[in-house]
Image (tube, helix red, strand yellow):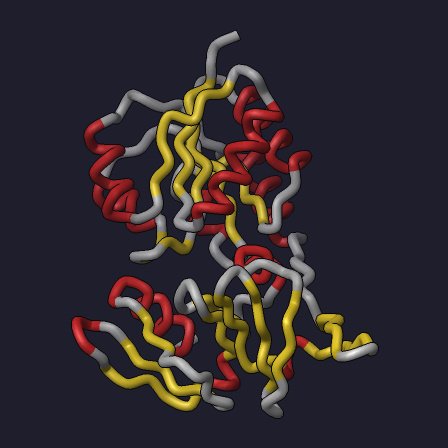
């Protein structure tokens, strides 16, 4: 069997590693030839290596913009499996070589199904159209994502359920993750920031830096900071400044304006 050369486009290193592990477990005839984390890097690599891959697994929201921007600056004829936390990009995905659309958190069965779908196409560059596209879009229309509605936290000798919507922000330091509620109570939770990103509703929460995930309802304002960065003020205010990088500030502004 021909070896399948795969490119992974994903800006979260932990998610990329997890996806690569699942791909390798799913099929021994897979080689991940490249991992890319930004639109700019992907454009450069795909322009320099137009025939060095067979299939792409691609996140949609990257550190410096949407992955659809890659298609505007390079010619890509190979099929794409979009892997994302958002189900509102399906139509655009299938206009950009998409053959499958998997919602995070993904599981091994969904990844294996996407690989089987790739193998069934007559030619690696073939795109779904006609009845196949209609069927795929119908499947997308039925996709729903369930997000955490509450967290169970320890407090002294008690277990307390907290509504997710009442959490102002999550913060990590020294490999410990804390949450602060809107009424200014703080707790330690066992989840990682990467797990939280997949568990939280992206319309309500956004990871604005390595340290912080914010609830939009806790945000008071954002000030322009040095070198194109943003300084965000929230309530309750944490002990340290919440600073958003220049690259992430584009996504932050789009998110706040949506």
**Is residue 133 placed above or below 197 in the rendered structure?**
above
Q: Where is the C terminus found, in terms of image quarters? A: bottom left
In this view of the protein, which residue sits in the foreground, 235 or 120?
Answer: 235
In this view of the protein, which residue sits in the foreground, 221 or 2?
Answer: 221
Locate residue 66, reporting x and y percent.
35, 55
Q: Is residue 121 left or right of residue 41?
A: right
Q: Residue at x 37, y 53 (%)?
A: 62
Q: Residue furthest left?
A: 227
In this view of the protein, which residue sits in the foreground, 181 or 164?
Answer: 181
Q: Residue at x 42, y 45 (%)?
A: 10
**Is residue 169 placed above or below 144 in the rendered structure?**
below
Q: Residue at x 55, y 82 (%)?
A: 168
Quadrant of the rendered image containing residue 9: top left
Q: Residue furthest top?
A: 1
**Is residue 137 placed above or below 64 in the rendered structure?**
above
Q: Is residue 242 left or right of residue 169?
A: left
Locate residue 136, reporting x and y percent.
58, 41
**Is residue 111 placed above or below 25 in the rendered structure?**
below
């Amino acid at each position: 069997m021909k070896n399948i050369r795969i490119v992974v486009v994903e800006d979260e290193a932990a998610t990329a590693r997890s996806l690569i592990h699942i791909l390798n477990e799913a099929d021994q005839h897979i080689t991940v030839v490249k991992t890319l984390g930004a639109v700019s890097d992907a454009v450069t690599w795909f322009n320099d290596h137009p025939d060095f891959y067979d299939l792409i697994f691609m996140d949609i929201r990257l550190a410096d913009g949407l992955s659809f921007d890659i298609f505007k600056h390079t010619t890509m004829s190979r099929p794409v499996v979009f892997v994302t936390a958002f189900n509102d990009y399906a139509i655009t995905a299938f206009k950009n070589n998409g053959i499958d659309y998997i919602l995070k958190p993904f599981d091994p069965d969904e990844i294996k199904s996407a690989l089987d779908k790739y193998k069934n196409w007559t030619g690696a560059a073939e795109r779904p159209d006609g009845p196949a596209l209609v069927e795929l879009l119908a499947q997308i229309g039925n996709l729903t994502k369930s997000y955490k509605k509450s967290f169970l936290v320890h407090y002294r000798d008690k277990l307390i359920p907290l509504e997710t919507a009442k959490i102002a922000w999550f913060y990590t330091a020294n490999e410990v993750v804390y949450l602060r509620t809107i009424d200014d109570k703080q707790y330690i939770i066992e989840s990682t920031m990467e797990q939280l990103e997949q568990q939280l509703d992206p319309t309500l929460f956004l990871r604005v830096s390595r340290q912080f995930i914010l609830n939009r309802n806790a945000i008071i304002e954002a000030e322009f900071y040095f070198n194109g960065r943003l300084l965000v003020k929230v309530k309750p205010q944490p002990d340290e400044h919440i600073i958003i990088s220049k690259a992430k500030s584009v996504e932050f502004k789009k998110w706040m304006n949506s």
